[in-house]
Amino acid sequence: MRNTKIICTLGPSTDKDGILEALILEGMNVARFNFSHGSHEEQKGRLEQLKQLRQKHNKPIAALLDTKGPEIRIGCFEHDSIQLEEGQEFTLTTKDIPGNEQIVSITYHDLYKDVKVGDSILIDDGLIEMTVTQLKGQDIICTVKNSGKISNRKGVNVPGAHLTMDFISQKDFDDILFGIQEGFDFIAASFTRTAEDVNAIRKVLKEHGGEGINIIAKIENQQGVDNIDEIIAAADGIMIARGDMGVEIPLEEVPIIQQQIIKKVYQSGKQVITATQMLDSMINHPRPTRAETTDVANA
């Protein structure tokens, strides 16, 4: 039996006839359901198809529910998007107002408590970088470091900041209950920061009859890296989520952190998953690059 397992993400592209069955026959071990997108109805349809096919082929394929996790987004602009220029002043506010070239609202209303002057704030996976220059009441006044265009509801990252926002949102709570009801095998907890985050999900599972579901803590920011030992102890496994990690943490540090976490989890006897851009070039090409084969070997 192969010790290393293969996780595949299901979505609209795998809904086409024969695709999911082909994944199963080619060696998929775990089906990942990304709850950042899609309705419960859509996800249930995919899960039912998976259950039918794994019974048909007598394959023990696990179902993994990947939560949306705690996230910060900007609000909407009056004209859907704006152009920011290097050096200009731009404000992030808790006020519920339509955005423009000078100001936009944010979904996390306590962000002003968690940042300080000099911190970097990234919007849209780092497309726009800003530096905090002033905290004025609940407004965060920034200087834009590079020109670019941003549009409605883009994600916000604050590298290095220890955010105090609630870990389980109402959406994640509802999704976890759905996962218990539908018989998922794993919960992948996005943006895990501390052991307390893992324990919070464990508590929900226990209170609603989901004790048999394993928790995979996704490490994707500095806070999670800093608390990795306690997170490993609390979780059933670890996922190194390199996508957001590469935004929150300098890219050159990600390979070293990956190696360190893999070693720690291996020594703990628990499972570790390396994720994001795995064999990415094979979306368009039949063979992986040499760098990608090395990446798989290191994982």
Image (tube, grey):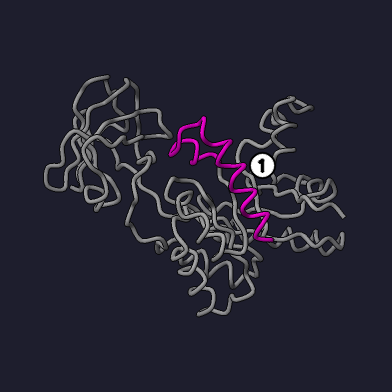
Bounds of the magenta span?
Answer: 242-269
Q: Nearer the viewer, residue 179 or 240?
A: 240
Q: Which residue is mark 1?
A: 13
* Majority SS type along the magenta span: helix
Which secondary structure lies at badge 1? helix
Residue at image point 18% right, 36% down? 141
Residue 39 left/right relative to 86? right
Q: Quadrant of the N terminus?
A: bottom right
Q: Quadrant of the C terminus?
A: top right
| 244 part of magenta stretch | yes
Label 1 sits on what residue type?
A: Ser
**In this orientation, does residue 156 appear?**
no
**In this orientation, does residue 217 appear?**
yes
Q: Nearer the viewer, residue 162 or 183?
A: 162
Q: Position of residue 291 (x, y in %)?
A: 70, 26
Residue at image point 59% right, 45% down? 260
